[in-house]
Amino acid sequence: MKLLRVGPAGAERPALLDQDGTLRDLSALVGDVDGSLLADTSALDRIRAAAGAGVLPALDATGLRIGPPVGRIGKVVCIGLNYHGHAAETGAATPAEPVVFLKSADTVVGPDDTVLVPRRSTKTDWEVELAIVIGRTARYLETDEEALAHVAGYAVAHDVSEREFQIERGGTWDKGKNCETFNPLGPWLVTTDEVPDPQALSLKLWVNGELKQDGHTSDQIFPVAEVVRYVSQFMTLYPGDIINTGTPAGVAMGQPEPKPYLRAGDVVELEIDGLGRQRQELKDA
């Protein structure tokens, strides 16, 4: 299934994109697409049955905002330097273990919402990423099979980053990762039955129509199952939590001087096989 949330920010309602590309209203069946729904197999089965029976009312998508596909996100866990190509372009050694950091859930916005360039920023960068959406509470998982069984689905994430704040201002990476609007997510949460192999997906990102990133999840240093298993050793993952799994080569930081960092007026578009497409216009904060 392709689950999503539509409507004004803060007042989104649950929806489904059917196999014909028609937007369907889920409001009569569920209150929201969130951790409670993702952990409720009977509710998900009701959605599947209603979709199969063709009884869900259609929504007019004209002018309808698409919000983040998951509501009430508890936390956003991120994995840094998780593609061989990206580690190489930034001159970083291949990590021996996943590099883990957190983004605040309030950085998450819709896939086509405006991204704000922070005040005094000169190094705002792009990063297309595969996002994992957790579907079952995960603690101390032991195997890859266990890890994948705790995944509800996948989505497109844009891990926007301010490199000066992240790297040159001391402390941890948090300052460069948690600026407002720095995690567009969606358009859809695509359930795992539609993504049989998360290591077989291409990721692309364009800036002002120019292809900048053209990667593949097979280049991940730590694949999806290992990421979920590993993170569960250090923190409890709850339904509705998000894990951003890193970005492929092609970010601005890895390019020759003058590095083409993002500015107000730029347009970023990104997509992942089967998971949909995002488009953001940048403005000054």
Image (spheres, rainbow, N blue to C red):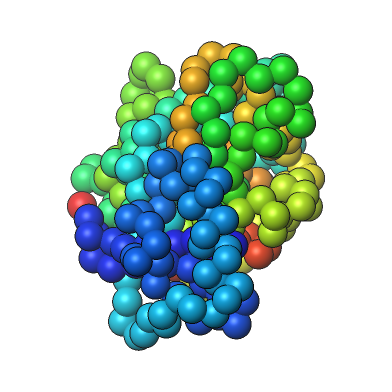
Q: Is residue 59 left or right of residue 83?
A: left
Q: Position of residue 194 (x, y in %)?
A: 69, 59
| Tally of numbered discs | 0
In the figure, is residue 247 to the left or right of 117? right
Residue 198, image x and y in percent? 72, 48
Q: Position of residue 255 (x, y in %)?
A: 59, 48
Residue 111 falls left or right of residue 41: left
Query: For residue 230, which quarter of the picture?
Result: top right
For residue 180, say whether it is visible: yes
Image spot of residue 258 (x, y percent): 49, 50
In front: 94, or 9? 9
Q: Above or below — where is 175 with respect to 159?
A: above
* Residue plotted at (65% across, 64% down): 274
Please state, as top left, top right, bottom left or bottom right, where the N terminus lies in the image. bottom right
Residue at (68% x, 30% y) in the render: 147
Q: Nearer the viewer, residue 70 or 272?
A: 70
Q: Is residue 275 left or right of residue 56?
A: right
- Residue in the picture at 43% in, 41% down: 35
